[in-house]
Image (tube, rainbow, N blue to C red):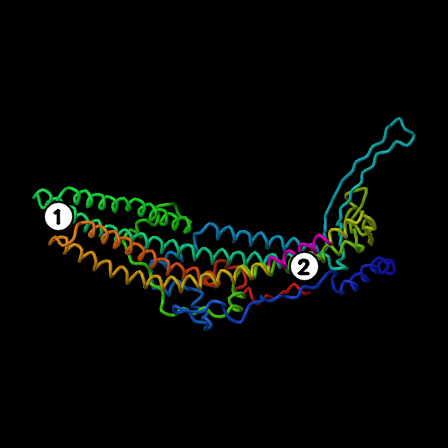
Amino acid sequence: MRCLLLYGLLPAITALVIAGCAAVGPDYARVEPDAPQEWHTQLRGGLTADLPKPETLAQWWRALNDAELSSLEERAVKGNLDLKKALSRIHEARALRGISKAGLFPTLDASASATNFRSSESSSSFEENKFYSAGFDAGWELDVFGGVRRSVEAAQATLEATQEDLYDVLVSLLAEVALNYVEVRTFQTALTVTETNIKSQEETYELNRSRYQAGIINELAVQQSLYNLERTRSLIPALQTGQEAAKNRIAVLLGEKPGAVHGELAERKPIPVPPVKVVVGVPAEAMRRRPDIRRAERNLAAQTARIGVATADLYPKFRLLGTLGLESVSTGNLFTAHSRTWSINSGVSWNIFQGGAIRQNIKVQSARQEQALIQYEYSILKAQEEVENVLVAYAKQQRRRQSLAAATAAAQTAVQLAQDQYRVGLVDFSNVLDAQRSLLSFQDQLAQSNGAVTSNLVRLYKALGGGWKSFEVNPDKPKNVTNRKQETKQ
């Protein structure tokens, strides 16, 4: 009996020894982003190449010193639906990894049956029998050539890519909340500017109407001041519409209904002012920090492992089957020692010919690996382009803001001079109209430029990959996913 058992287990023991060998297919070696040593754009406007502190990038919006914005960011992380969907995808990826790991273990089935058989009384061998059985069936496909291990490898890398996707969603969410908040404050500033000009133009219109009624001026100046006033009034609805849309967008980003934040954002406040100094670091650090690049790298690792899964189909599959049970013609004897049955079987199967389908599948997976590598390299280039563009935009917009501030100050002086000279009859009313229109235009452009400077700072922090370590959005994952215990090279 012992010799028979040993004979049955010999193929399994041999297979387990072989299973210690390396899995078929290429071993993945982690690739690092290919980035230049410094930015192409010359850093100006307070930008420096010093390495940013992790805590500064983690909560970059606090540099704007706006408590309302900080509150909105925290609420967005708790309620945003895109973030919740990304978190659900992580749970899905974990479950799929668990399915892949299940292939490393044997299966066990339990069964029981009772049979009552009676033959025909007219037959020569009339009889009536009963038969009872119960037992366990076990099966194990041995991962000799590593196909299952490669599938686990791919599932693990896919899980890590899904986690990076969550962080990418978080980076975009934090930036979108800030951009829409800055937009709300920009519209509010523009509304204040427009309403101030309306008040001034109303005074001018009343003055001209009084002077016309007194016979001092003709009707032309009255009509000119009226259409100038109404033109300025016509700007209000568009500004209010933009403000409402930005507030509603913030509410949706927070996972709330449109109108939910209107009350708390009703009070007009100034546009957040960027800090004097902004640390951007060097390209290599920024590329390693960005979740979209790390996601592309993990996708490359997963696709490399899938080549091994496809390659394993070229080799034979070893199976070990076993049965342990009880059989008896009566229930009284079913659980006695004499009713025990067992069997151990080993088998092998090999797909010798499938019309080249297996090798073609290997080529398919290899081509997809090449595509994943190209996507990884493209992600790096797009990231560098994004950072370079926003570096230029941030610095140039500050220069534009300085010029607009000087132009606005000059326009204010020009309006006052034109009004004074018009009252004493030194110039006609067209000079006042031109000065007022110019002042309104410059003040509006200055408000938009102030908002653009802050918005460009937000885009810069997003391009640098800031914000994804700011909140714990997934408590049941390892806190530091960059220190992975399992690399794809196994």
Quadrant where the image shows the N terminus: bottom right
Task: Using the image, tell me which numbered label, if any, was put on residue 207.
Answer: 1
Mark 1 or mark 2, which has the lower sequence index?
1
Taking the view exactly as shown, the residue that stands out farthest to the left is 214
Q: Which residue is located at x 19 percent, y 46 percent?
A: 225
Camera-side residue of 466 and 227 = 227
Q: Is residue 68 left or right of residue 102?
A: left
- Residue at (19%, 42%) from the top-left corner? 223
Q: Position of residue 211 (x, y in %)?
A: 10, 46
Residue 415 picture location, percent across and down = 20, 56
Residue 75 falls within the magenta-colored stretch: no
Counting labels gives 2
The amino acid type found where label 1 is placed reads Leu
Say which residue label 2 marks. Answer: 304
Magenta stretch encompasses residue 364: yes
The amino acid sitting under disc 2 is Thr
In the picture shown, does residue 356 fall above or below 293?
above
- Relative to 121, is 334 on the left or the right? left
Residue placed most toward the observer, 463 or 229? 229
